Image (cartoon, grey):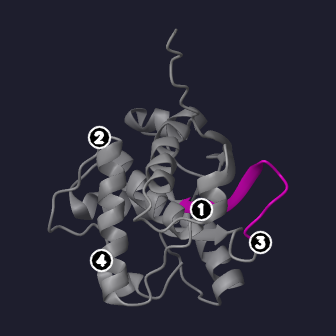
Amino acid sequence: MAVRPCRIDVLSIDLAFDASGSDLSDPTSLRLGEEHTWIKHLQPWIEAIRSNSDWACPAVVRATDAVSLGLTLSDDATLKELNNSWRKRDTATDVLSFAALDDAPDFQADPCVELGDIVVSVQTARRQAIEQNHSLERELRWLVSHGLLHLLGWDHPDPEALQQMLAMQERLLEISGNVQSRGHLPVDVDSKLDGH
């Protein structure tokens, strides 16, 4: 009797990516402006979350073979405008998430599950990277992982939930080889309690 190899299905990601409104002029940041760079990180992050039953993840995402999401790398002015329009806060912020699954039914007829959109200010990310003494690439990955968790239903209404979310972000960055030192938070905890 012949043994057939086990087939492992890989999650397909349809990424609507836009970095045209961001300043990624630094030569070391060129790959950050490329779609495949972000797919390379998002895919294992989503796979890890959906394959671990202990981690919060919508059932529809666990069951699908394909997800779709948007990622926009932009600037402070755009984030301020979006933050004011959608959250009635007239300030810039580092990352905003617009989750499509919040109002979606548990079952979707479309084989590709729409997660929503993540918008990141590269200007704020650059400032935060300098403040935290790490690379812009590391900061952008941190912010995108935060936005992704929001798309998957994670939130931080209190300090305990925020700590759980930040710990998950560290796990995700470890998956892609970008380790954040333990005990050092790259975000201001008090400013992050109000949600994205």
Mark 3 or 4, nearer chain start: 3
x, y percent for residue 64 = 67, 49
Residues drawn in magenta: 104-120
Which quadrant, please, contains the C terminus?
bottom right
Q: Looking at numbered disc 3 in the image, what kind of residue is underneath it? A: Pro
The residue positioned 23% from the left and 55% from the top of the image is 180
1 or 4: tag closer to the N-terminus: 1
Q: CA distance from mark 1 to mark 2?
A: 23 Å
State whether residue 83 is above or below residue 183.
below
Residue 85 x %, y %: 71, 82
Secondary structure under tag 2 reads loop
Q: Residue furthest front?
A: 1
What residue did someone put label 4 on?
163
Q: CA distance from mark 3 to mark 2?
A: 35 Å
Q: What kind of residue is marked 2?
A: Gly
Residue 74 in sight here? yes
Residue for point 35% across, 41% down:
176
Q: Residues within 10 Å of mark 3 (few under 14, many from 20)?
A: few
Q: Given contact means CB atoms under 8 Å apart, are the residues at marks 1 and 2 in contact?
A: no
Q: Which residue is mark 3?
A: 105
Is 119 a magenta residue? Answer: yes
The image's mark for residue 119 is: 1
Locate residue 140, reporting x and y percent: 42, 53
Label 2, on which residue?
177
Residue type at mark 4: give it: Gln
N-term-proximal mark, 3 vs 1: 3
Q: Is residue 143 left or right of residue 89?
A: left
Mark 2 nearby-residue class (10 Å; few <14, some 14–19, many ≥20)? few
- Mark 1 or mark 2, which has the lower sequence index? 1
Tell me where residue 102 appears, x and y as whole percent. 68, 76
Q: CA distance from mark 3 to mark 4?
A: 29 Å
